[in-house]
Amino acid sequence: MKKLLLQTSAFVAAGLLAHGAYAQTASTDQPIQMKLGGQYYTGAAAMISQDDQPGDAAYKRQPVGFQDYFLIRFLGSTTFSNGITAGVFTRLNAFSAPNAAASTTNGFQSSNNTTIKDSYIYLRNAQSWGEVRIGDFSDVRRDDAVGTNAGVTGDQNTGANSAAIYFSNSPVFNLTTLNLDSRGTKIAYYSPVIAGFHFAASYTPDKAGGHTNGPGNIGDNNGLTDNQTNGLTPSLLNNATAYNYWSLSTGWAGTVGPAKVAWTAGYSTASRKGACSNKVALGNDALSNDCVLTPTNNADPQIYNSGVQVNYGPYELGFDYELSQAFPNGLMGTGAGVATAFNAVGVPISFSTLKTNEMVNKNLDLNLSYTIGAIRMGVEWSRGEYEGLTGDANVKRAVTNDVIQVGATYSVGPGVNLTGMIQQTLYDAGGAYVPNGANFTSGTGGVAANNNVFAKNFDSTALIMETSFRW
């Protein structure tokens, strides 16, 4: 009987193996196929007019400059017979554009260099349950935003609202799609489209994510932000500014009469931890005054965004607006605030609790284009308002930065464009607050020791030529 059972089991196993081999051979499913894509942008600008006196952001800057932006995409996907699409995406950037605001004192500005910007995998069934994505990429509010791709070039990488190819010499640059979590490792969900509507959500535990591993990292307490190394999850005891980033977005796309319309709205926030004066050793407790979440220092950052894109024949209109608050409702201070009571002779005797600015940024981009044949003519207006930027944390004064572009793009052929435009930049300091002194007395090299480039008005006019290659 035992021998018979063994023989029967062998026959069954052989049958199963044969069936499995047959199923695998008969399947039409294919593995992920990779392909290469990318784009290259370059531009040249001549500042035909700009404020470049001692203390200005453009002081001792050349009137002519070049920039480039090289992007390579490694992407692949396959759709199985069950309707599920599996894919992978990696983007490598290499460019020399500014990636931060100018230095307060000398107007210097740091630049980006070669880096992996996005890297993620996804599973998708657009008709039934949508898409799940995990990896390093922008949050869904930023990823979903529309309204920034009209104007002269039809591409945010080269417009007035760009952090890639951008010439201005203004102390700040405008951008309506701020990346709050720095593309930290996250999980995201995108719903299927139902009657034109969609919904998306993403969550990031820590902005540094898992891609910061490398020599020199010690636990998760190395550097200014949490690092996820050696199996440790992000620490709540070091000097990162925030954690638990999450984002929501929604939108609608469809036709209204002869026009195609797309609209999106999004929200991002995070939990801000209190300031830690020193990094905390692994396994140790923070000092009593470290990382304390109180009304004084626990102001969670928030970003709101909404945009619309309208295509009507040869016309394209875009509008995008974003409001970011670094410290909603401000931070509590220790000095005297606004006077609330006075004695008989008018001397203040009672004050409200002092609060700093909320550090509110308001950015908008309005763009319009008209295309006829291979020529696209357009205009774009980008405006930024930055509260408290001039240096006085307790005066709700906002500087404004307006950038206006007018020009045209010629399509040489598929994927190859040439652009020419004229650009006007108008920066208004909104009060010209001068810290630590009453004036900008020239110091070594002509720049005052108490200089503040944000606190001085700035204007410039530029002639710009750009080209883009896509493949």
Image (spheres, grey):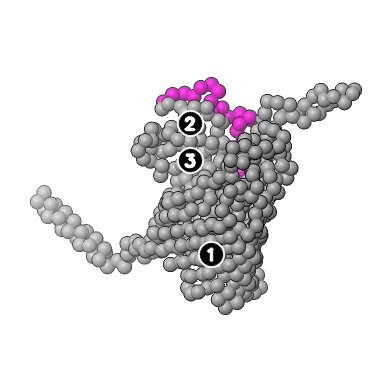
Looking at this view, name the residue that lies furthest to the bottom.
373
Residue 23 in picture, x, y percent from top left: 26, 64
- Name the amino acid type tagged 1: Glu
Which of pointers 3 and 2 lies earlier in the amino acid sequence?
A: 3
Queried whether the magenta region covers residue 296, the answer comes back as yes
Residue 101 in picture, x, y percent from top left: 58, 46
List the residue tagged with mark 3.
206
Queried whether the magenta region covers residue 340, the answer comes back as no
Are discs 1 and 2 less than 8 Å apart at CB?
no
Tell me the quarter of the picture where residue 84 sits. Answer: bottom left
Mark 2 nearby-residue class (10 Å; few <14, some 14–19, many ≥20): many
Which of pointers 1 and 3 lies earlier in the amino acid sequence?
A: 3
Tell me the quarter of the picture where residue 433 sits. Answer: top right
Judged from the image, the secondary structure of the residue bearing numbered disc 2 is loop
Tell me the quarter of the picture where residue 103 sits. Answer: top right
Judged from the image, the secondary structure of the residue bearing numbered disc 3 is loop
Which residue range is magenta in the image?
283-305
- Name the amino acid type tagged 3: Asp
Q: Nearer the viewer, residue 429 or 86?
A: 429
Residue 447, compared with residue 111, is above or below; it is: above
State the CA–CA distance, disc 3 to disc 2.
12 Å
Q: Nearer the viewer, residue 214 or 284?
A: 214
Residue 228, compared with residue 48, is above or below; it is: above
User: Label for residue 29?
Assistant: none
User: Label for residue 466?
Assistant: 1
Image point 60% across, 74% down: which residue? 371
Quadrant in which the C terminus appears? bottom left
- Between disc 1 and disc 3, the foreground one is 1
